[in-house]
Amino acid sequence: MVPVAALGDIVGGDQVLTDPSMVAGYTMDWTGRFVGAHTVVVRPGSTNETAAVVDLCRSAGIAIVPQGGNTGLVGGSVPLNGEIVVSLRRLNAIEAPDVVARSIVVGAGALLADVQAAAAAVGLRYAVDMGSRGSATIGGTIATNAGGLNLLRYGGTREQLLGVEAVLGNGAVVSAMSGLAKDNTGYHLPSLLCGSEGTLGIITAARLRLVPAMPCHATAMVAFESIDAAIAASVRWRHDLADLEALEVMLGDGVQLVATTFSLPSPLTTDHDVVVLVELAATADPYDDLAAAVASVDGVLDAAVATDSTTRSLLWRFRDEHTSAINRIGPPHKFDVTFPIAVLGSAVERVRGVIARARPDAHVWIFGHLGDGNLHVNVTGALSVDDELDDLVLNAVVEMGGSISAEHGIGTAKARHLPWQRSQEELDAMRAVRDALNPDRILNPAVLIP
Ligand code: FAD
Ligand code: 2HG
Ligand code: ZN
């Protein structure tokens, strides 16, 4: 039995949700693909309350799923095995940015978009960005080591992390928030917690690195004659363009789907099979560099260049809205995979072929972060839970030297496949760390480590 009254004594009775209509939004993930049973949701308002909740759950033997914005795509944020949900959304304080140290201290429940806005208000930038910015929390992005749209220039979430405060699974509160640029004093706990998917501790706050905001942007949607031509251009541009900020790929069916779903006018003169979104950001207008870059590569069929912020936003909507547009068809089966750039072109064909043979009636949508070799493969018209399809696709990914999780994490969706990618020794080391910091396995027991 969940000690509802005791939880209420810690966080306040109104912050313990039991009513099914209040709880429902916490038990189903963003896609509708992962749905847990009715449970209790606890919403602590401070680190101390979070620690007291963890202590109580440890002594009562109750498992916890920490939850931020619930936008995770691998079934790690919802209670699939009778856990309670500890929602961090109330820990959403955002301190004034430290413009001298170029950092910002934020609560785990702060929304990514709000942190970006706080940085922008002082001429700085939080360099992690992605389509879920309006719902994803900083705690969730740290727990998943989110990648996003600008990783090729600034790195992923781990690279932005100067400090973390967390309640470990053993109840201890660790706070490594000094934010010193250099600090080689032992294990770097923020890095360890980053990407741990809530299996080591509940992140309650973080200090994040900020970078100078680039005032000038040049953005283009470029159609290529083939995926191989797009990949060749991306390799060239990554080498040549110091101000390269984003390099994303979409295919013709996805572009058309977004246009139809959201009634967007096509920026290109006709439909094309392979479209790349490329963006430069600099202190002076990078338009000429972008135009020269587009002219310098082979296989370009068409291009639309944004010279104002309205057109820039329109071009970005085609990329940002892929996930939403596909989801409107019905909960898709998702793969989030990376390949070495040398095999990326053949990987697209192989993955497509594997799915077409196994599920001939399904539709395969491919888009992603071309500059990182990261493809998002969404399958609609098949079951959203399909173990056989998982095995076929992920086996092909491993055989081609890729990763079964580029940026979304392992969650519950791919826990079974982690041993396909990690050696027994690596898994033993991960288990040892997990068992040291989360000894009773009350935090996300079904996530990440099988
Ligand atoms: P949740 O979904 O709530 O949780 C995710 C995981 O982290 C769960 O395992 C949960 O238990 C754990 N967790 C959450 N908060 C905490 C905490 N405070 N302490 C410990 N553990 C915690 N991801 C990318 O990497 N790149 C993208 O470009 C990208 N684009 C997206 C676009 C859309 C439209 C959507 C819906 C998702 C996208 N995602 C992307 C996936 C998702 O937004 C990220 O994984 C994000 O980091 C999750 O944040 P969240 O707050 O929603 O976490
Ligand atoms: C993106 O890059 C996200 O848009 C979501 O990582 C990917 O929906 C997906 O599969
Ligand atoms: Zn992505």
Image (cartoon, rainbow, N blue to C red):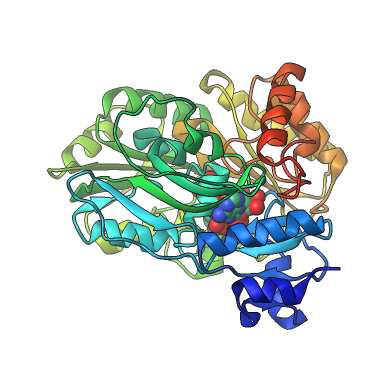
Q: Position of residue 421 (x, y in %)?
A: 71, 24
Vertically, is 286 above or below 403?
A: below
Vertically, is 352 above or below 398?
A: below
Vertically, is 42 above or below 151?
A: below
Q: Position of residue 361 (x, y in %)?
A: 82, 50
The residue lying at 42 percent from left, 65 percent from top is 265
Toward the left, the furthest residue is 284
Residue 27 visible in the picture? yes
Q: Position of residue 298 (x, y in %)?
A: 37, 26
Locate residue 9 relative to residue 372 in the image: left or right. Answer: right
Total numbered circles: 0
- Residues 11 and 84: in front is 11
Q: Position of residue 382 (x, y in %)?
A: 81, 52
Locate residue 135 relative to residue 81 in the image: left or right. Answer: left
Locate residue 196 relative to residue 159 in the image: left or right. Answer: right
The residue lying at 78 percent from left, 49 percent from top is 362
Q: Quadrant of the N terminus?
A: bottom right
The residue lying at 50 percent from left, 58 percent from top is 137
Residue 416 quadrant: top right
The residue lying at 34 percent from left, 42 percent from top is 178
Residue 253 visible in the picture? no
- Residues 342 and 429: in front is 429
Residue 93 quadrant: bottom left
- Residues 362 and 92: in front is 92
Locate residue 31 relative to residue 391 in the image: left or right. Answer: left
Q: Quadrant of the C terminus?
A: top right
